Amino acid sequence: MKNLAIFFSIFFLGFFISAEQLYPGLDEQQLKRLNYLSDNIRCPKCSYGNISSSNAPISKDLKEEIAQMILANKTNDEIYDTMTERYGDYILLNDPEKRNPLIFLAPLIVLIISISVVTIYTIKKSK
C-alpha cells in the first residue's frame, strides 16, 4: 500500500511541473517565444508534427537548444537560419517566403491543357 501511495504521488507530481521549471532561465515572454518557435519547427524524426507536440528525444533536445539560443539573445531569424543550416528548409513548417504559387497552379494548368488536347483530338477525329 505504501508503494502505491509513492507511485501516485510521483505520478501526480509530474502534472505540477511547469515550463518554467523545465527551462529555468526563461521568463514569461521568452517562454511564449520558445512555444512560438517550437510550433513552427518540424520534428526531424516525426516529419509531420512540430517539436512542441513530439515526444521524440531529438525534439526535446532541439527545444532545449532553442531555449539556450533565446537566452543568448538570438533573433528568431538567426534561430531559423541555424535550424535550416543543420536540417534544410524542410525543418520549417510555415515558411511563406519560400512558397511557390506554381505548386498550386500546376494541377489547374495540366487540367486545362489535357481538356484542350482531348477536345482538339475529338474535333479532328469527327471530321
Image (tube, grey):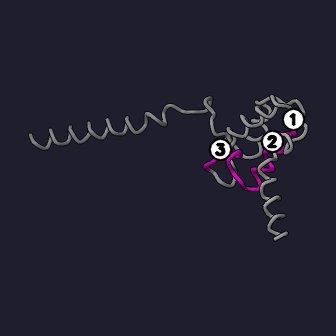
The stretch of residues the image draws in magenta is 48-69
Residue at screen point 61% across, 49% down? 48
Nearer the observer, disc 3 or disc 2? 2
On the image, numbered disc 1 is attached to which residue?
Answer: 26
Nearer the observer, disc 3 or disc 1? 1
| Up-down relation of residue 62 to residue 80 (above or below) | below
Work out whether residue 23 or residue 75 is closer to the camera in this orientation and state it: 23
- The magenta stretch spans residue 109: no
Say what amino acid the circle numbered 1 marks. Answer: Leu
Q: Position of residue 98 (x, y in %)?
A: 61, 32
Q: Position of residue 2 (x, y in %)?
A: 85, 69
Work out whether residue 17 or residue 89 is closer to the camera in this orientation and state it: 17
Q: Determine the image quadrant of residue 94.
A: top right
Q: Which quadrant, please, contains the N terminus?
A: bottom right
- Marks 3 and 1 sit apart, C-alpha to C-alpha, by 28 Å
On the image, numbered disc 2 is attached to which residue?
Answer: 19
82 vs 117, left or right, is right
Work out whether residue 89 or residue 109 is closer to the camera in this orientation and state it: 89
Mark found first going from the N terminus, 2 or 1 = 2
Q: Position of residue 123 (x, y in %)?
A: 15, 38
**Extreme residue toward the front, this view:** 1
- Residue 90 numbered mark, or none: 3
How many residues crowd around disc 2 within 10 Å: few (fewer than 14), some, or many (20 or more)?
A: few
Q: Position of residue 97 (x, y in %)?
A: 62, 29
86 vs 26, left or right, is left
